[in-house]
Image (spheres, helix red, strand yellow):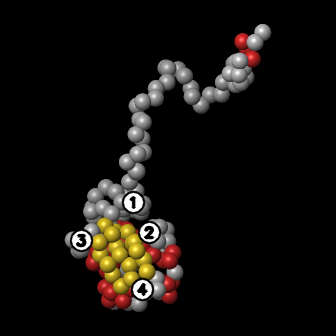
Amino acid sequence: MSKYEPLQAFLKNQGREYVPMSFAEIERVLNDKLPPSKSQRAWWSNNPSNNVMTREWLAAGYETESVDIAGEKLVFRRVRNPGTDGGSHGSPSAPRSLHPGFGFMKGLITFEKGFDPAKPFSDEPWDRGYFGEGERR
């Protein structure tokens, strides 16, 4: 069990979209002190490769925002319901979902059967005829 798992459990039990917390409140939930890196903005980023604690709040379905290092407070914002098929960051317990615009043109472009779009055009130079050279004889 990670020392930061109590934060995941705490956040999963919140029924709110926004969970404002001070660093001291997080330490009470963890029953342990946050590391000195808590004073670095990167510690609170939502990059799942950043640190072990980040993976816990992401797995709970939350991201950090409005991080106030000097005031030692932040807001956790719900980004998905725990147990659904996606979140905004990937990890084994929180699969990455795609942007809604991804694939919006799927099915709109088709190729003639047998055409290979990756094959270079070698039958003539790419610029022949495009600038009117072939028409000026």
Secondary structure beneath disc 3?
Answer: loop
Of the numbered discs 2 and 1, the one sitting upstream in the chain is: 2
The three-letter code of the residue at mark 3 reads Arg
Residue bearing the label numbered 3: 16
* Res. 57 mark: none
Sequence order check, earlier mark of 1 and 3:
3
Sequence order check: which comes first, mark 2 or mark 3? 3
Q: Which residue is mark 1?
A: 88
Any part of residue 124 in sight: no
**Residue carrying label 2:** 46
Picture quadrant where residue 90 is located: bottom left
Q: Nearer the viewer, mark 4 or mark 1?
A: 4
Q: Can you say which quadrant of the picture contains the N terminus?
A: bottom left
Residue 72, which numbered label? 4
Label pair 2/1, CB-CB below 8 angstroms: yes
Q: Residue at x 47, y 67 (%)?
A: 47
Q: Earlier in the sequence, mark 4 or mark 2?
A: 2
- Spatial CA span between label 2 and label 3: 19 Å
Mark closest to the chain's N terminus, 4 or 1: 4
- Asked which secondary structure carries label 4, the reply is loop
In the picture provided, is 20 more to the left or to the right than 127?
A: left
Question: Which residue in the rendered view is the most extreme toward the right?
Answer: 137
Q: Which is more toward the observer, 71 or 88?
A: 71
Inter-mark Cα distance, 4 to 1? 25 Å
Q: Position of residue 42 (x, y in %)?
A: 51, 75
**Label 1: how many Cα within 10 Å (few below 14, some 14–19, many 20+):** some
